[in-house]
Image (tube, rainbow, N blue to C red):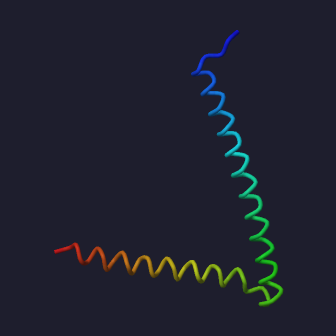
Amino acid sequence: MVATRDEDKLDDYQRLSGFLLFRYRVLSFLYSVASLLGEETQRKKGGGRGLSRRRASVEELNTSFEEMFSIVRAQFEV
């Protein structure tokens, strides 16, 4: 049976999506390993405070974002 162009395109799309999904899974695994190694290194250097520092920095970012958002919202309110 001869494959049509649409079937070839579908096969190419499925192959590409499978490759991208595989790549995403590998990269997310590597990121999680690097994150765990970084936390372990921070724990050894800082006496276990690495994770709390990261949480504090995330909270600071959230706070600064909320402040910026309130300033912008105040400018648009009349």
Q: Does 47 appear above or below 27? A: below
Q: Closest to the observer: 30 or 47? A: 30
Q: Quadrant of the C terminus?
A: bottom left
Q: Does 52 appear above or below 21? A: below
Q: Determine which quarter of the picture holds residue 31.
A: bottom right
What is the x, y in percent for residue 27? 72, 57
The residue under the point 69% across, 52% down is 24
Q: Determine which quarter of the picture holds residue 48.
A: bottom right
Q: Furthest residue to the bottom?
A: 46
Q: Closest to the observer: 59 or 20? A: 20
Q: How many marks?
A: 0
Q: Does 19 appear above or below 57? A: above
Q: Furthest residue to the top?
A: 1
Q: Furthest residue to the right?
A: 44
The residue under the point 76% across, 58% down is 29
49 vs 40, left or right, is left
What is the x, y in percent for residue 37? 81, 74
Q: Quadrant of the N terminus?
A: top right
Q: Determine which quarter of the picture holds residue 7.
A: top right
The residue under the point 36% across, 75% down is 69
